[in-house]
Amino acid sequence: MPATIPKSDFRRRRAALMNLMDGDSIAVIPGAVLKTRNRDSDYLFRQDSDFHYLTGFNEPDGVLVLAPGREHGETILFCREREARSELYDGERLGPERAAQIVGVDDAFPVADLDDILPGMLEGRERIYFGLGDHPEFENRLLGWVSTLRARESGGARPPGELFALKHLLHEQRLIKSAAEIRAMRRAAEITCEGHRRAMRACEPGMTETQLEAELIYEFMRRGAKVPAYSSIVGTGTNACVLHYVENSATLKKNDLVLIDAGCEYELYASDVTRTFPVSGTFSPAQKALYEIVMAANQAAIEACVAGALFMDPHQAALEIMIEGLLDLKLLEGDLEEVLETESYRTFCPHGSSHWLGLDVHDVGDQRVDGEWRPLEPGMVLTIEPGIYVPDSAQTAHVPARFRGMGIRVEDDVLIGAEGPEVLTTHAPKTVTDIEAIMKEAP
Ligand code: GLY
Ligand code: MN
Ligand code: MN
């Protein structure tokens, strides 16, 4: 079980979900399975976020079933049985008996018996809640069990009549972070910032993007975050204009900027931070001019992160500042209204500025409710990540050479608080002065 989230939280989450479920329903939540990377090697196991949120159980092949009103227990875990030979190779398994006790569910069974046991649990329930589309193979099995029950309908079986997306119930809960979750996210953010600081100190011309990435990963791991929350982006020069660039193999040149978008995962919670800095340690006047625009956009967007503001308000604040800045530098033509109307800003500002953050880096939860942007509420965590990109391409042929071949993004993680925004990622330098200062420090 993760150290930061108490067992009582997992229990409370299961109870809250069951409270929202319609009478006569059942929820089936499969955990992650191991995936082959190549031949006998698997990808490092990462638990499914919904399953983790409700159990904290970190083995592959688990299935959680919530069956309100079930006589022999409402919360049921299916998991792998103990098996000496497998445990010799892959480590200890809890097995159903110990898992029930440690996870705190009412009942547990071997997952190998799912075909025999689960159809009986589905029988007589009107509705099944399930992560539709999230687990295609398991979904086929589930439909198979429902078909089996339907085939026995004339003999008196009562198959479920509805399959309903679990996300409408569960993801609203995941969107508002508890105190324990916020503790884990603060730690993820702190470790991530240490990684960025190390990379800034280590950066020098002639290094490769891979070597700079290694500095980050080293800092993440030595501070207890075993994996990044997503593939790290280390892009220098025009590579920074490829929004999800992960090749990270080019050599850093002294007159270029380098953009690092990387965050660690700590107890399954993500951090997501971008910093952009000059390879040489000193911004050129053109780099600084564009950078200051993105910084101002980042600040304005953070200030807009107040309870009651709408999800899109921070982005709108950032976008208007970036457009004004690009108009001042004559990279855009016209005025603010015209640029917004024609969307000509998209050449340089092609993406939004926020997404939810939590167990998933692009975390769950609707950004709109009934078609309207939803209001921000205390306990939500989102990113603020405005960016300006000037690739060295035909599209930017009209732009003076000093501005071409750079991508700048400044991304922070922000907790909506009752008293205003709390930036979780302040420890990673982002003003021109602070960046130039840390880059003078010894690695
Ligand atoms: N690192 C992915 C993102 O910023 O959304
Ligand atoms: Mn990012
Ligand atoms: Mn992001």
Image: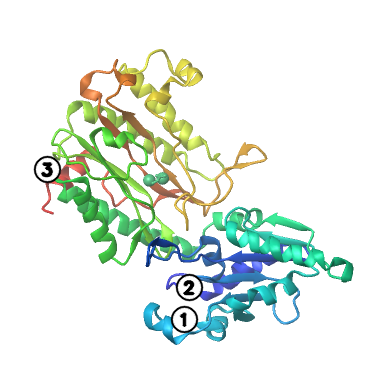
Q: First in sequence: mark 1 or mark 2?
A: 2
Give residue 206's mark. Answer: 3
Q: Horizontal and vertical percent for residue 136?
A: 59, 56
> Circle 1 sits on which residue?
93
Residue under the image location 36 percent in, 43 percent down: 411
Disc 1 and disc 2 in contact, CB within 8 angstroms: yes
Calculate the distance from the C-alpha at mark 2 to the C-alpha at mark 3: 43 Å
Of mark 2 and mark 3, the one earlier in the sequence is 2
Quadrant of the picture in which ligand 1 is shown: top left
Q: Secondary structure at mark 1?
A: loop
Disc 2 target residue: 59
Asked whether, in this view, residue 402 is left or right of residue 334, the answer is left
Residue 149 drawn above or below residue 257:
below
Figure disc tally: 3
Q: Position of residue 79 (x, y in %)?
A: 55, 76
* Residue type marked 2: Glu
Q: How far from the left and from the top, in percent, is residue 321?
A: 39, 27
